Amino acid sequence: MKINFAKAHDFSTLKNGVAVLVFTEEQAKKANIKAVKFAKENFDFSGKSNQSFLVSENGKLIGIVGAGSEKKLDELALNKVGSKIVALANGAKIKNVSVFFDLKNAADAAAKIAFGAALQSYRFNKYFEDKKKDKAFHLESLTVTAPDAAKAEKEYAPLKILADNIFFTRDLVSEPSNVLNPESYAEICKTLSKEGLEVQVFGEAEMKKLGMGSLLGVGQGSEFESKMVIFKWNGGKKGEAPLAFVGKGVTFDTGGISIKPSANMEDMKTDMAGSAVVVGLMRNLAQRKAKVNVIGAIGLVENMPSGTAQRPGDVVRSMSGQTIEVINTDAEGRLVLADVLHYTNTKFKPKFIVDLATLTGAIIVALADVYAGLFCNDDDLAKKIESCGTKTGERAWRLPIGAEYDEMINSDIADMKNVGSGRGAGSITAAQFLKRFVGETKWAHLDIAGVAWKGKGDAMAVKGASGYGVRLLNELVKTYEK
Ligand code: BES
Ligand code: ZN
Ligand code: ZN
């Protein structure tokens, strides 16, 4: 979908496409336009944010969209207006739309409406031989009108970059695992050096030298070579400690020898979503030239059962020196992250580490696809992430960690085991496991198993890969830029 900005004018003079008029609740009350009066009388239109209608007037269609109360018209509410407009147009198979509104800070509002529209326009349709078979018809062009169109376009520039990088992440997550494997994924990562990122790829031999027995054990059943990719963005002062983001990149999770049931196993192509968020985030920081030093680190493996796969009961030695009894080969994400976290922490001595992983089914039981689970050893960092989550709509709910949970991963024959004893607190014991690999460094873990993929879709994300985390962490990074 193309997004343009144009100078505001009387909507009735629009030549091409359908005019969509946006009203707050306060404006809807007073509105004297024929089409709005019609919507008020016949559809109970009152400007609420969940309302959108098409009305016909003199043989012309007019769209009417509610923006909610003026008092609540924040960034997310404006995004939602844009998203509503795209949903309305797609539903009615309209190709061109122009948006009209009368709001404070019009250029800023126009940009935020455009951003919401962009996020809702995403489709992963590369595998339709004929794109028209993509049943979700999509709007071809959206023009947002504002008194100062040039200013609106300028305000939109960073949001356009952000939307593009959220799409980059969504594309990676949607890609099937016969296409995206640890080797092909690492090749894609290398191409990002053209964005100004330093990209370093480690193969199995290099990781073996580093002692990464925990990560390597997970990948040893696969035909594909396991990889670790390190991205560096040096936008800050030379020598200043970086921020670090670490992602789980299991390109397919069969469970390994502790094999998963076949129902819905296809969803496990998304088990690299944490890594894809790190990649999309790093690309975004490079493209917007963020004024801060940042490390992105991802562990790429495929978890397969085979004659060379690791077995339940195997003991592996992680790079940190700590040994792990692998009780369940399906609890592989933490084994991958253990080595990437330790490497990132000891090599770069970051200000903090945030990791993202589709780590546990238990977090879906607790929070569904609404909140990510947040685990953190530092209250200030946790508060920051929570508030960036509220601001961007990518919300995170903090859950506890502590000694009682840590104890549950003690093993009889090694330093720890990769699942908790007992049935409870599966997401927490997974977090406790990760915590043992970050030392004293400030650290937060986002379990995104529920939010990485939207079964139904919502205002910000269409059905499918959400890209959850790119926007949230971009906002977090901003708070560290001078
Ligand atoms: N990748 C899964 C977690 C997952 C489940 C992500 C559903 C998205 C949707 C992870 O590797 C896993 O299998 N975890 C196990 C851990 C258990 C064996 C301790 C789980 O959650 O069942
Ligand atoms: Zn698993
Ligand atoms: Zn997994």
Image: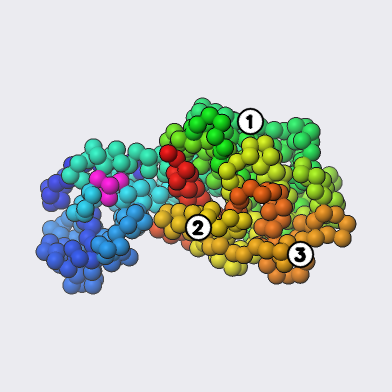
Quadrant of the drawing holding the C terminus: top left
Residue at the limit of the structure toward the right, as seen here: 413
- First in residue order: circle 1 vs circle 3: 1
Front of the two marks 2 and 1:
2
Circle on res. 200: 1
Quadrant of the drawing holding the N terminus: top left
Quick check: 185 above or below 8? above
The residue where tag 3 is placed is 408
Front residue of this view, candidates 106 and 31: 106
Determine crowd level at label 1: few under 14, some 14-19, many 20+ residues with C-alpha closer than 10 A: some
Q: Amino acid at mark 2?
A: Lys
What's the residue at 44%, 44% (across, down)?
Answer: 478
Q: Which residues are magenta?
A: 107-111
What's the residue at 72%, 59% (across, down)?
Answer: 260
Circle on res. 334: none
- First in residue order: circle 3 vs circle 2: 2
What's the residue at 76%, 52% (across, down)?
Answer: 256
Q: CA distance from mark 2 to mark 1?
A: 32 Å
Q: Amino acid at mark 1?
A: Gln
- Left/right of residue 10 with respect to residue 350 in the rendered view: left
Does the magenta stretch mainly form a helix, a strand or a loop?
helix
The part of the image, by quadrant, that contains residue 232 is: top right
